[in-house]
């Protein structure tokens, strides 16, 4: 169902790795809604090659960029404006990676080189992206920058490991930069805190499937899918949400405000 919600808008979409990626769904839906955009991902992720199919399907160019490299981001932003023929209206930051999670380092025994990488890739990359856009005056007035977060930024989910700290930082950067960018260019910066979703990044978390089931039962509406998340992202890129900025927006079927649900309570009935 397309409504030309993003007709004429230009964007940059980070993080489409394969068809499960949240960014992939955002790209497909943004295309349906009339946007044009550049796709980007870390050069190493390009090796899988799947992003080429998405580029073809959406008529997009791909510009590789390691989101931790200011040089790569400079190139991405300047080239994107050239390719798209003007300033950028929306940016999706859909990036996450923790070497401590990957190498199964317990939170209490984190490797600090890994920890720095987690922060750099998963959080500081948002600051670097925003600072690059700001420096090049690349965003249109009322433009919208979104990053994806998770409720482990507010509450403990032990196996989320150092990604929880990265998400706290990510949300704080959105708030701080949102202030400065709002004052300067009326640019909006927000994070969307999404339900657990089956993707490559999600599956790296220990006990993920059990956790998805738990979350499903703890959410009055059930877990939000990647496609539903994409739709919410589009609404945040559209002109219908112009005064929303510096927020962390829960897109989680009600999980964040639920203490307990009947199905969960019933599991404790016999004890
Ligand atoms: P995904 O694995 O499909 O996407 C993660 C992306 O980050 C990949 O495309 C990867 O190549 C990219 N990336 C990693 N290092 C990079 C770097 N140095 N430079 C540029 N890109 C880099 O997984 P998913 O789930 O779509 O993740 C997208 C975002 O959604 C992440 O921020 C994740 O933390 C967040 N999120 C995911 C949830 C889930 O359960 N899957 C729940 C809540 C938030």
Image (cartoon, rainbow, N blue to C red):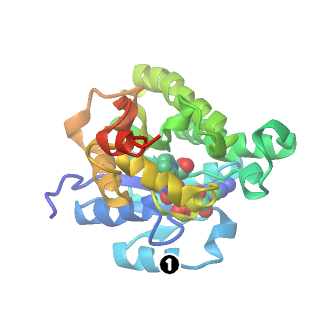
**Disc 1 target residue:** 52
In percent of the image, x 77 and y 54: which residue is there?
A: 104
**Hey, which quadrant is residue 249 in on the image?**
top left
Residue 36 to residue 61: above or below: above
In percent of the image, x 49 and y 36: which residue is there?
A: 151
Q: Nearer the viewer, residue 87 or 68?
A: 68
Question: Seen in the image, is 218 located left or right of residue 14?
Answer: left
Where residue 152 appears, as percent x and y from the top left, is 55, 36
**Hey, which quadrant is residue 36 in on the image?**
bottom left
**Hey, which quadrant is residue 257 in on the image?**
top left
Quadrant for the N terminus in the image: bottom left
In percent of the image, x 37 and y 36: which residue is there?
A: 250
Q: Is mark 1 within 8 Å of ligand 1?
A: no
Residue 78 seen in the current view = no
Residue 258 seen in the current view = yes
Question: Seen in the image, is 173 located left or right of residue 143?
Answer: right
Q: Secondary structure at mark 1?
A: helix
In percent of the image, x 33 and y 43: which residue is there?
A: 219
Q: Residues within 10 Å of mark 1 (few under 14, many from 20)?
A: some
Where residue 205 appears, as percent x and y from the top left, is 62, 55
Where residue 15 appears, as percent x and y from the top left, is 53, 59
């Amino acid at each position: 169902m397309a409504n030309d919600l993003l007709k004429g808008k230009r964007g940059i979409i980070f993080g489409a790795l394969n068809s499960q990626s949240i960014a992939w769904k955002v790209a497909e839906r943004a295309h349906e809604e009339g946007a044009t955009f550049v796709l980007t991902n870390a050069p190493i992720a390009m090796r899988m090659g799947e992003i080429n199919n998405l580029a073809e399907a959406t008529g997009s160019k791909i510009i590789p960029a390691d989101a931790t490299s200011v040089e790569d981001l400079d190139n991405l932003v300047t080239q994107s404006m050239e390719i798209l023929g003007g300033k950028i209206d929306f940016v999706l930051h859909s990036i996450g990676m923790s070497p401590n999670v990957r190498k199964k380092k317990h939170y209490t025994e984190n490797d600090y080189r890994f920890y720095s990488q987690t922060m750099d890739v998963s959080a500081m990359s948002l600051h670097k992206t925003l600072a690059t856009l700001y420096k090049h005056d690349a965003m249109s007035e009322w433009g919208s920058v979104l990053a994806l977060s998770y409720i482990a930024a507010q509450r403990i989910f032990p196996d989320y490991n150092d990604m929880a700290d990265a998400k706290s930082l990510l949300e704080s950067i959105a708030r701080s930069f949102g202030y400065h960018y709002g004052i300067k260019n009326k640019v909006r910066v927000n994070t969307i805190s999404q339900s657990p979703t089956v993707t490559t990044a999600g599956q790296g978390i220990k006990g993920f499937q059990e956790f998805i089931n738990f979350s499903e039962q703890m959410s009055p509406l059930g877990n939000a899918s990647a496609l539903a998340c994409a739709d919410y992202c589009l609404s945040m890129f559209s002109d219908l949400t112009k005064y929303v900025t510096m927020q962390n927006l829960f897109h989680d079927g009600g999980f964040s405000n639920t203490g307990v649900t009947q199905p969960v309570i019933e599991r404790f009935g016999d004890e």
